[in-house]
Image (cartoon, rainbow, N blue to C red):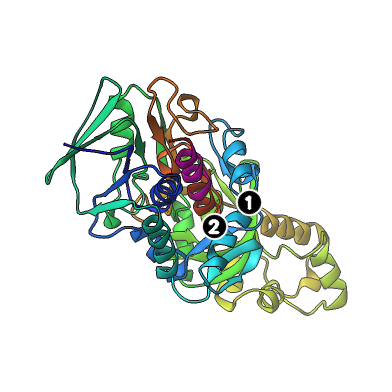
């Protein structure tokens, strides 16, 4: 049985960051990856250009049963730290909206960066390895696959969550955590499109229509584009609130978020011969304007309508209520809410409190970032925290 200082299960963003950090500290590191290559989710992220971090990273952009857990790791490995690494490798990048940083070229550049850094630390990486058993005795972990077995005093769970199963994602991290007696916060899909049924199903005819809105679930609201699909609602604003939405709860959409209160009565005085539909068509896609006007149900010239009816229409447009009947599930979810409970881990090192030498990082942990590079930054920060502690 070959021996290492640490075995890292999972060759994604967090696992590779942990490996390169520990390897460059002189540790003998083995990465075991089930897929035929490392970094598969990195390669498809950001439309193939990898939204590798967000310059606005802050603890309040993360969901967790313990919202303070992320503070230590994020403060010690920042977005600027990863950007320095990107620039050191000569990778051209650009900022999109809301602090999101992307490669100018390809996500492959980020994977190559991680592999180059791992090579500098003499990290061994084995792909196509299906883990058949993990045992722990006498302060050492033994890992078996279909091709061999290895042991180490440290084991890192970096196998992610069950989102995007077609990429090989599974709930293996949770099974392993439970094997070692660690609590798991019930996982659910996040950053995922929502589906519509009932009366809302009429909006499916708008498939392909997009507009900027403020989407709200509970006390959380995001201003970005919403997209109508043949199954329901998607787009950045919807993906963001999906992390906070719970089955049975409504989702509120503010159409025309830049219009001030009283704009419809004001429009009546300025242009009494206009219709609701024509007013909406100036600011919204034609099909959406038609659908909303039909559902509001006010016919004819607005000059003939009482202000009270116009204000009611305005209020409905400002807080249009949808009742999602579900989401598109892990198949379309970018990440997972929930995971290995942070109460079980040290926020400084990611080490399990009850099992010395056992670590959990990245998406396997109950930490979920907003859309826009935040989850990658958590992968880098948590991976660096564990890699510095091994």
Most foreground residue, 221 or 315? 221
Could you tell me which quadrant the N terminus lies in?
A: top left
Dividing the picture into quarters, in which one does residue 292 lie? Answer: bottom right
Residue 289, horizontal then vertical, whole percent: 61, 72
Q: Which residue is mark 2?
A: 373
Q: What residue is pinned by disc 1?
A: 57
Point 81% across, 62% down: residue: 260
The relative height of residue 154 versus residue 126 in the rendered view (above or below) is above
Residues rendered magenta in the picture: 380-388
Residue pictured at 58% horizontal, 73% vertical: 290
**Residue 389 in the image: above or below residue 289:** above
Q: Residues within 10 Å of mark 2 (few under 14, many from 20)?
A: many
From the viewer's side, name the closer residue of 269 and 145. Answer: 145
Which comes before the other along the chain, label 2 or label 1? 1
Residue 139 image point, x, y percent: 30, 22
Decide whether the magenta segment is chiefly helix, strand or loop. helix
**Mark 2 → mark 1, Cα distance in angstroms:** 9 Å
Q: What residue is shown at x 54% (from left), y 47% (from top)? A: 369
For residue 348: magenta? no
């Amino acid at each position: 049985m070959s021996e290492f200082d640490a075995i890292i299960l999972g060759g994604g963003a967090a696992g590779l960051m942990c490996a390169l950090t520990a390897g460059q500290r002189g540790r003998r590191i083995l990465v075991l990856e089930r897929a035929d290559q490392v970094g598969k989710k990195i390669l498809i992220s950001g439309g193939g250009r990898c939204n590798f971090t967000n310059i606005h990273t802050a603890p309040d952009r993360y969901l967790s049963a313990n919202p303070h857990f992320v503070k230590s790791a994020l403060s010690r490995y920042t977005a600027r730290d990863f950007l320095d690494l990107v620039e050191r490798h000569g990778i051209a990048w650009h900022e999109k909206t809301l602090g999101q940083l992307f490669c100018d070229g390809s996500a492959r550049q980020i994977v190559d960066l991680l592999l180059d850094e791992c090579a500098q630390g003499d990290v061994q990486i084995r792909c196509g390895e299906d883990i058949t058993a993990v045992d722990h005795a006498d302060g050492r972990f033994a890992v078996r696959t279909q091709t061999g077995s290895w042991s180490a005093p440290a084991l890192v769970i970096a196998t992610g969550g069950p989102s995007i199963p077609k990429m090989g994602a599974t709930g293996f991290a949770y099974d392993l955590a439970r094997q070692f007696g660690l609590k798991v916060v019930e996982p659910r899909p996040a950053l995922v499109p929502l589906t519509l049924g009932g009366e809302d199903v009429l909006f499916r005819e708008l498939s392909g229509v997009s507009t900027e809105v403020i989407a709200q679930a509970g006390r959380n609201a995001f201003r970005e584009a919403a997209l109508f699909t043949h199954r329901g609602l998607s787009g950045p604003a919807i993906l963001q609130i999906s992390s906070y939405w719970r089955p049975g709860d409504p989702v509120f959409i503010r159409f025309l978020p830049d219009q001030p209160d009283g704009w419809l009565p004001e429009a009546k005085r300025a242009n009494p011969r206009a219709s609701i539909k024509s007013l909406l068509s100036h600011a919204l896609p034609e099909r959406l304007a038609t659908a909303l006007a039909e559902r509001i149900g006010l016919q004819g010239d607005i000059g003939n309508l009482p202000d009270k009816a116009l204000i009611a229409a305005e209020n409905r447009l400002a807080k249009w209520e949808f009742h999602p009947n579900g989401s598109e599930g892990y198949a379309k979810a970018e990440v997972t809410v929930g995971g290995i409970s942070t109460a079980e881990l040290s926020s400084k090192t990611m080490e399990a409190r009850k099992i010395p030498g056992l670590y959990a990082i990245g998406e396997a942990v109950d930490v979920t970032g907003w859309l826009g590079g935040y989850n990658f930054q958590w992968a880098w920060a948590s991976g660096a925290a564990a890699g510095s502690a091994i």
